[in-house]
């Protein structure tokens, strides 16, 4: 009784309601080569759609791994997948001067994200990297558009003296480094002449270009025209253009500066027609993606033109200044970012926009009204399915003037900076991505090693996929036999059953004989031919994911202790034909060696026609259903038994154990899984010596039910006048 100082009533609760929970036994595990997704990291998928979302569609190099996973998911909805690759796997980047491998989200943050303790990315990788390794990343393109700037009457006055086509601007009381940047167009407020700023030397000195090359004498007021890479009207670009070549695609400029003011991909509008720029030859020559109208002649003469960012149509407005920045007296912090399937490898359509990120901020502390991060680096890393941020674009370093700031600076800084590098753009195709799909046995084993520890991950069914006997043996001996809570499903090699007419039995038996004896492993007889809808072709794939899938389906539809074979529960899905369909004699040969035949019967489908494990010695454990029964019993009772840890080994603890286990086994018995059982946990097996060793022993005796493998039907002819009771015992 609990101690009390004075008389009183003390209440206490004793919980005798504990039960043994039945554990799930349908979780699959597989490691293989895929086109996308994290490397050497366990990812759980519950459907083929999610398999595609995480690891992408198969190609000629990855279909074996893909369909191993997909075929299992046709029966169950719980598969743990590990992508593996060789040392030649790389992420695509916007600057492939150096290769980089970012295996996973964790690897990125630990290595490249300084806010999480990473050292930061090298400048050699460009502004962005593909989320994961693989050639698919080479189809990605990233566009970034910096902030719009308003029209501004410049401080002070200027005079311009030309030498050839280049003019030197001399300012009086001007602030060029604060109010201008390269690419700005400024206008003489007196004469209406436009000039393009090509360099800024100081607050009082700059260089310009003009179509007129006319000096501005004296000191007059100038206006910086509204400027943006998002869009530029005819008054915000320099010169006039014409298109007169026979192909109607070459845009020739007069007084233009195409290689300063245009990027490939930008859209230009002239005479009411809008066309994308394919390439830029010089300041006065650019090629369009499509020909202009009319079909007979091009645009002749010199006309005004305008331009817009390639992806402007994907956003409702230009980037300017965020509300967050405005409240802090900061300007021009917004950027738009877009991710594009440039080559069509993701969507099948070139140029498809995959993601848009409108109105992000270059201020490191920018937040939306609901507290979501607006900082473009953080927002992209958290939200993008395709890219990582690696560094700020070139040209975003702070100017020498006091009121400017680097991208990535706080908007709350004491200097109240303006993010004046507003028209920085990124228009970069990713390159350098590589799959690394050629796997050795050692690499494959490395992936499966992620499933070694039963404490780290719960699995029940391990799919060997297409593998050598070396890999299969490792999975059996070093994972399944060590864990003792899962089974490995194996198929012979493709060459054993595809185009091996007459040699199938020998080859399969040789493969099986290279595997260890184990009740934790199952081998089938081959491969199937199935349709690959992603590539419109047929493929040979191993049957072991289907066999494991039948175990899942049997568990879900009947119970874990039922055999997954036969006409009732052994129907294999998605079979165009078997690579090899064994006859009765061949099946007999295989079955006595522990190989479970998969057979196509005319008019009755394709069936798993055996339920043996790879246990060589005769035992109840040489059947799949019995091994599955004991795995479930052992896992469930072991989980419950953990709650006896650190309790006293006394009558109360032992009786509590028995009172919980017996109803659990009685339920299994009632469902047909066992015929009888006994639970012994008392002084007979928990002797004083056992107690002194700090041990606790519970002995569970179980008689498992057996599946029917052989049927004998006796048809007895009995002559007239004989009672059946007279002859029954004679048969």
Image: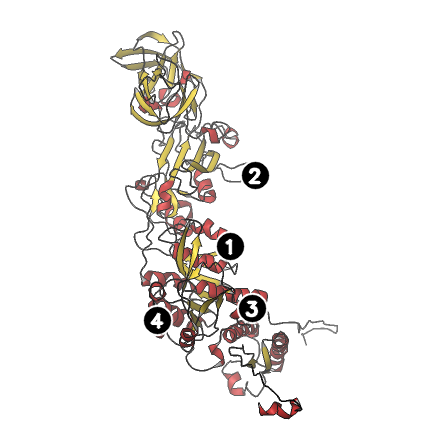
Q: From mark 1 to mark 4, how far is it between C-alphas?
A: 32 Å
Which is nearer the N-term, disc 3 or disc 1?
1
Q: In the image, 270: left or right of 74?
A: left
Which is nearer the N-term, disc 4 or disc 3?
4
Residue at label 3? 568
Q: In the image, 721: left or right of 520?
A: right
In terms of depth relative to the viewer, which is nearer, 643 or 588?
A: 588
For the C terminus, which image quadrant? bottom right
Residue 218, image x, y percentages: 33, 6
Q: What element carries label 1?
A: loop
Q: From mark 3 to mark 2, how far is it between C-alphas?
A: 56 Å
Numbered mark located on residue 47 in the image:
1
In terms of depth relative to the viewer, which is nearer, 209 or 40?
A: 40
Residue 104, compared with residue 601, is above or below; it is above
The image quadrant that residue 345 belongs to is top left
Of tags 2 and 1, the one toward the viewer is 1
In terms of depth relative to the viewer, which is nearer, 195 or 327?
A: 195
Residue 315, image x, y percentages: 49, 30
Residue 382, compared with residue 236, is above or below; it is below
Task: Say few, some or many: other residues with alpha carbon within 10 Å of mark 4 (under 14 / 14 to 19 / 20 or more).
Answer: some
Residue 711, compared with residue 178, is above or below; it is below
Residue at label 4? 511
Q: From mark 2 to mark 4, how far is it between C-alphas?
A: 61 Å
The residue lying at 42 percent from left, 23 percent from top is 274
Q: What element carries label 4?
A: helix
- Count of numbered circles on the image: 4
Of tags 4 and 3, the one toward the viewer is 3
Numbered mark located on residue 370 in the image:
2
Of tags 3 and 2, the one toward the viewer is 3
């Amino acid at each position: 009784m609990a101690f009390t100082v004075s008389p009183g009533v003390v209440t206490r609760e004793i919980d005798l309601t504990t039960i043994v929970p039945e554990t799930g036994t349908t979780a699959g595990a597989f490691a293989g080569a895929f086109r996308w997704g994290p490397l050497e990291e366990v990812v759980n998928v519950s459907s083929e759609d999610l398999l595609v979302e995480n690891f992408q569609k198969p190609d000629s190099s990855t279909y074996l791994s893909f369909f191993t996973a997909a075929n299992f998911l046709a029966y169950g909805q719980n598969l743990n997948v590990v992508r593996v690759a060789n040392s030649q796997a790389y992420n695509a980047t916007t600057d492939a001067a150096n290769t980089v491998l970012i295996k996973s989200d964790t690897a990125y943050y630990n290595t490249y994200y300084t806010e999480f303790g990473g050292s930061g990315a090298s400048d050699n990788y460009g502004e962005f990297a593909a989320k994961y390794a693989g050639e698919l990343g080479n189809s990605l393109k990233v566009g970034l558009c910096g902030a719009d700037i308003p029209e501004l009457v410049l401080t002070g006055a200027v005079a311009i003296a030309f030498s050839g086509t280049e003019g030197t601007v001399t300012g009086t009381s001007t602030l060029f480094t604060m109010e201008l940047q390269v690419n700005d167009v400024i206008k003489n407020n007196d004469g209406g002449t436009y000039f393009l700023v090509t360099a800024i030397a100081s607050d009082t000195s700059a260089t310009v270009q003009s179509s007129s090359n006319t000096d501005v004498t004296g000191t007059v007021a100038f206006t910086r025209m509204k400027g943006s890479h998002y869009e530029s009207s005819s008054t915000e670009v320099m010169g006039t253009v014409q298109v007169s070549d026979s192909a109607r695609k070459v845009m020739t400029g007069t007084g233009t500066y195409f290689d300063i003011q245009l990027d490939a991909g930008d859209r230009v509008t002239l005479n009411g027609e809008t066309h994308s720029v394919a390439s830029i030859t010089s300041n006065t020559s650019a090629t369009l993606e499509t020909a202009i109208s009319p079909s007979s002649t091009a645009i002749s003469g010199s006309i005004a033109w305008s331009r817009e960012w390639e992806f402007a149509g994907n956003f409702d407005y230009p980037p300017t200044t965020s509300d967050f920045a405005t409240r802090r007296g900061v300007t021009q912090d917004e950027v738009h970012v877009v991710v594009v399937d440039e080559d069509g490898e993701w969507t099948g359509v070139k140029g498809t926009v995959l993601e848009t990120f409108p109105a992000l901020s270059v201020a490191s502390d920018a937040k939306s009204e609901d507290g979501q991060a607006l900082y473009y680096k953080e927002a992209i890393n958290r939200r993008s399915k395709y890219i990582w941020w690696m560094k700020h674009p070139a040209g975003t370093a702070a100017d020498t003037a006091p009121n400017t700031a680097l991208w990535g600076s706080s908007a709350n800084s004491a200097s109240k900076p303006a993010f004046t590098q507003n028209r920085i753009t990124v228009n970069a195709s990713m390159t350098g991505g590589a799959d690394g799909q050629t796997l050795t046995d050692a690499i494959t084993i490395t992936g499966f090693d992620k499933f070694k520890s039963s404490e780290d991950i719960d699995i029940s069914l391990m799919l060997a996929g297409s593998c050598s006997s070396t890999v299969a043996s490792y999975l059996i001996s070093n994972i399944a036999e060590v864990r003792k809570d899962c089974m490995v499903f194996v198929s012979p090699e493709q060459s054993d059953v595809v185009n091996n007419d007459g040699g199938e039995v020998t080859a399969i038996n040789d493969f099986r004989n290279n595997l260890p004896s184990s009740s934790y492993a199952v081998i089938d007889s081959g491969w199937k031919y199935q349709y690959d809808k992603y590539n419109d072709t047929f493929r040979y794939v191993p049957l072991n994911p289907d066999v494991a899938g039948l175990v899942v389906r049997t568990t879900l539809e009947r119970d874990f202790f039922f055999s997954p074979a036969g006409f009732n529960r052994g129907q294999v899905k998605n079979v165009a034909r078997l690579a090899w369909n064994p006859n009765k004699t061949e099946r007999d040969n295989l079955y006595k060696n522990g190989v479970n035949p998969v057979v196509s019967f005319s008019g009755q489908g394709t069936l798993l026609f055996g339920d043996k494990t790879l246990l060589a010695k005769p035992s109840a454990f040489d059947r799949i259903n019995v091994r599955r029964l004991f795995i479930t019993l052992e896992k469930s009772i072991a989980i419950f038994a953990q709650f006896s840890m650190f309790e006293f080994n006394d009558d109360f603890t032992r009786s509590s154990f028995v009172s919980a286990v017996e109803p659990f086994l009685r339920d299994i018995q009632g469902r047909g899984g066992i015929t009888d059982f006994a639970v012994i946990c008392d002084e007979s097996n928990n002797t004083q010596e056992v107690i002194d060793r700090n041990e606790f022993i519970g002995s569970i005796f179980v008689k498992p039910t057996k599946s029917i493998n052989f049927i004998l039907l006796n048809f007895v002819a009995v002559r007239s006048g004989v009672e059946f009771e007279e002859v029954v015992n004679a048969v």
